[in-house]
Image: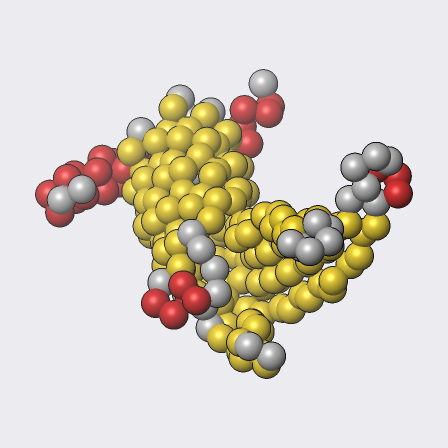
Amino acid sequence: MNVRTGILLLLLGLAGAREAAAVVPGRVGLHALRLMPRGDSDDYSDASWGGGLEVIVPLSATGNLVAVDFVGAIVNFESETIIRVDPSSLLRTEQSNSQNLARFGTGLRLGPHGHGLFQPFVGVHGYLVAHAIRSTLLIPDDFDETHSVQQDLGSESDWGVGWDATAGLHLNFGNRFGAYGGVSYFRSAGLDRPLGEDEVTVDPEYTDVYAGLSVSFGSFGG
């Protein structure tokens, strides 16, 4: 999107917002996201898929140009099973690893939230971030699965805080349904990561690309 196209979309959105500066119903949206690590964060995680939820509540006192945004997302960084076979005994083991990140927060979004079709926006959010890692080891019994031995290798979880800055476009279809997408810069702080036999505290950063569908609260009223 070039600068001229962006300005045109913003003007069209503002025109729609000026048509109705009265109370505008909020909306709820569900989206898929792709979280891609930046810089040194590549050492601790890979690009991964997740899902998110957002609730947008426009503030009529601002002419519906500012909205409060409640957001949340869950991302699975790693979910894999590693199979190892001992060459001498032929004993097979299966190690399963799972690594997940969840974030929940709120912020402000700037842009038209009225009745226009094109609604470009920018926003910032603050988050509470949770990170969890769990590993299990399975020694399978091929003759009777009930005799398989499973061992919990341990699980770790830690909490931190984070923030993001986002920009995107919401398409409003008849003030009832919509589609939206955008890109964010996301950074969290104070998360522990393994480094050899020790742990280090890191501040991972990511690029977040997302797209989803929304429905207006007014749609639930018939």
Please tell me which residue is depicted at 55% across the width and 32% down the height of the picture: 217
Above-or-below relation of 26 to 137:
above
Residue 184 at least partly seen: yes
In front of the other: 218 or 1: 1
Above-or-below relation of 211 to 153:
above
In front of the other: 27 or 33: 33
Please tell me which residue is depicted at 86% across the width and 35% down the height of the picture: 144
Please tell me which residue is depicted at 48% across the width and 38% down the height of the picture: 31
Question: x, y (%) of residue 159?
Answer: 63, 68
Question: x, y (%) of residue 25?
Answer: 50, 35
Question: x, y (%) of residue 102?
Answer: 59, 55
Count of all numbered marks drawn on residues in the image: 0
Q: Quadrant of the C terminus?
A: top right
Left or right of 79 in this view: 20: left
Q: Quadrant of the N terminus?
A: top left
Question: x, y (%) of residue 142?
Answer: 79, 37
Please tell me which residue is depicted at 46% across the width and 73% down the height of the picture: 203
